[in-house]
Amino acid sequence: MTKIVSVTSLFLFMFCKILRAIMTKLHYFAYGSNLHPLRLKERASSAEVLGVVEVKAAQLTFAKRGTDQSGKCSFLRTSNLENVVHGVIYELDACDKKPLDHAESLGFGYNQQSLNLVLHGTTYMPFTYVADRQYVDHSLVPYQWYKQFVILGAQFHAMPDAYVAWLASIVAIPDPDPQRNAENLARLDRMKEFSRPRKHV
């Protein structure tokens, strides 16, 4: 009986592995709190890094009103090519799109947008989330833990020091909700541990 269960489990494992391999893949451009792979994998477990890219003539903001009434990331198009938003193209399974849409409140603060980006000589058209104009308020500031999500992501992907320094200069405030704050500080600790180089034994 045990042998039958083991064979069945192995079959299911291999079947799922093959199924995931042939499933439709999507490309996603992360530029805010989803930059760090651990953070994104909590929302889309299949997400894998393809590489770091830039969106030129664009300015990162923390002006999108979140459900917690704090500032979240979005970006605005500008006429200045020197304005750059650094981000990462991730590849993920199509089945992870719906959970990610839900986590990002698609249709309730964020709209989906397609980009045309070149990475290592290959053109990708990843989707991303940009704030709906009705949810933009430039008087908003992020919570401290949210700002750290973005900074840790930028550092993980070795983004330019000047960009990380600019992120660090953004004004942030403590989260007034103790439970939410504790949960996200714990998440930050996991992200830091994930980023730490592993020691070879």
Image (tube, rainbow, N blue to C red):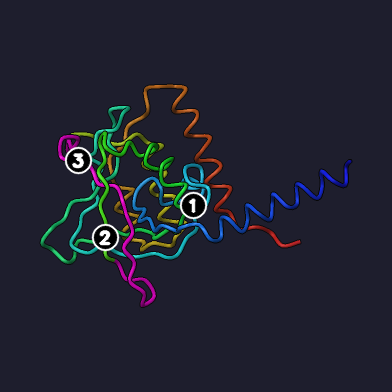
Q: Disc 2 marks which amino acid?
A: Leu
Asked if marks 2 and 3 touch (Cβ < 8 Å), the reply is no
Counting residues from the start of the chain, the first of labels 1 and 3 encountered is 1
Mark 1 vs mark 3, CA separation in Å: 25 Å
- Residue, x 19% and y 35% (percent of image)? 135
Q: Which mark is residue 37?
A: 1
Q: Which residue is the site of mark 2?
A: 115
Residue 129 colored magenta? Answer: yes
Tell me what residue is drawn at x 52 percent, y 52 percent: 46
Residue 79, picture quadrant: bottom left
Type of amino acid under label 3: Asp
Question: Image point 47% across, 47% down: which residue?
Answer: 95
Q: Nearer the viewer, residue 21 or 115?
A: 21
Give the magenta range. Answer: 117-138
Residue type highlighted by circle 1 = Pro
Residue 63's x, y, as percent? 22, 40
- The answer to which quarter of the image holds residue 59 is bottom left
Q: In the rendered image, which quarter contains the N terminus? A: top right
Q: Which residue is mark 3?
A: 132
Q: Residue at x 39, y 75 (%)?
A: 120
User: Which of marks 3 and 2 precedes in the sequence?
Assistant: 2
Provide the secondary structure element on which disc 1 rests: helix
